[in-house]
Image (cartoon, grey):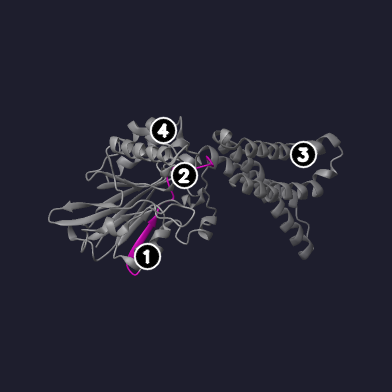
Amino acid sequence: MILLRVLILFLVLLLLPDWYIYRSYIRRLKNNKMRRLYWLPSVVLLAGLLVFIAAGEALHGCLGIYLVVALCLSVPKAVFALLSLFLKGAGRLFRIQIPHGWISSFAAFATFAYVLFGAVEGKEFFQVKEVEFVSPDLPEAFDGYRILQLSDIHSGSWKGNGEAIRRAVEICNQQKADVIVFTGDLVNSRASELPEFMPLLSDLKADDGVFSIVGNHDYGTYVHWNSDAEREANFQKLIAEEKQMGWDVLLNEHRILRRGNDSIALVGVENSGNPPFPDYADLPRALKGTEGLFKVLLSHDPTHWRRSVLPETDIQLMLSGHTHDMQVSVFGFSASQFVYPEHRGMYLEEGRGLYVNVGLGFVLFPFRLGSWPEITVITLRR
């Protein structure tokens, strides 16, 4: 299904600009061989996509590289075509001569360089986001308490690149947070993705420890299993691996964090998503025993906030991930906002907050642009 959607996207992003560029510029060339060669990259890309569709899961390991190459070719062409059309129209409207070909070419090359940066460096362009959450409900002893949030590591996507994870862990430890929380999607699908990175992730340190929850990918939903028992065994293995790293996995439960005579509750639920994403959260169970406490909820999917957390609880702050901000944001705009009303950053409603971390890792596309990999430090204030 995903590949069919990509095929449709190609028809719009690749072939339509190609058709326009060929009619407006390429067919003027006198060299017939050059005119025919113009179509070669697009033909190869489309043929490659058909191979991926036919091969199914067998070639998924190469799909990310293929998609990045396709983006590097198709997006600059789309920018060229749109800008060229606009400049031609402006020239005719104002009856002036505009060098539309040169200007559009410059914009296309700049776009190519930016997209290439996203593929080569963007996925490792780790950014520390410092935010504050203010609540009069916060106990005095926790004023200034620092929570470091990580989300969506997708360890299978980092295979063979432990150095990047090591640098991210080093940046995290430099923040001297009081507690570290991870809000789900540690793997793409299989627990076997994690052992390569366990020694590195075990080095995450905070005075009050490292706590984690699970996300939709952690259930192994996106690969074929021979039985439900095999899928469940994979899930339990992942939980065991997290515990081996020293992480405290919260599965519809909570922990009490203390400072002197004051305390707050750190609550963690399993994934609670809208279909087709799984919903295994049991929020009442997780909250039992936290009455009257300031609460920080870890819940992977931000849609949980409006569906259940705001209307049914008194939780002051929820931390989520999941959206990745679709890994692309241009001038602050991301298509993720059409899918998730709360897709990136802090959201406040009547003094209660939701923070959506756009993730440290990536899935499918080995690529980030604008929505850089994020390490969040949230300081609690009274």
The amino acid type found where label 3 is placed reads Tyr
Residue 167 shown left or right of residue 244 in the figure:
right
* Residue 310 spot, x, y in % from top left: 35, 66
Marked residue nearer the N-terminal end (1 or 4):
4
Question: Closer to us: mark 1 or mark 4?
Answer: 4
Q: Main secondary structure of the magenta part?
A: loop
CA separation in Å, label 2 and label 3: 41 Å
Pointer 3 residue: 38
The amino acid type found where label 2 is placed reads Thr
Which mark, by number, is residue 27?
A: none
- Of residues 32 and 299, the one drawn nearer to the viewer in this rendering: 299
The amino acid type found where label 4 is placed reads Ser
Label 1, secondary structure: give it.
strand
CA separation in Å, label 1 and label 4: 38 Å
Tell me if mark 4 has few (under 14), some (14-19) or many (20+) residues whose alpha carbon lies within 10 angstroms of its own.
some
Label 2, secondary structure: give it.
loop
The quarter of the rendered structure image containing the C terminus is bottom left
Pointer 4 residue: 192
Marked residue nearer the N-terminal end (1 or 3):
3
Outermost residue toward the bottom in this view: 350
Marked residue nearer the N-terminal end (3 or 4):
3
* Residue 332 spot, x, y in % from top left: 51, 56
Q: For residue 364: magenta?
A: yes
Q: Which stretch is magenta? A: 350-366
* Tag 3–tag 4 contact (CB < 8 Å): no
CA separation in Å, label 3 and label 4: 43 Å
Residue 107 shown left or right of residue 224 in the figure:
right
Which mark, by number, is residue 348?
A: 1
Would residue 159 be seen by someone viewing this image from the given angle?
A: yes
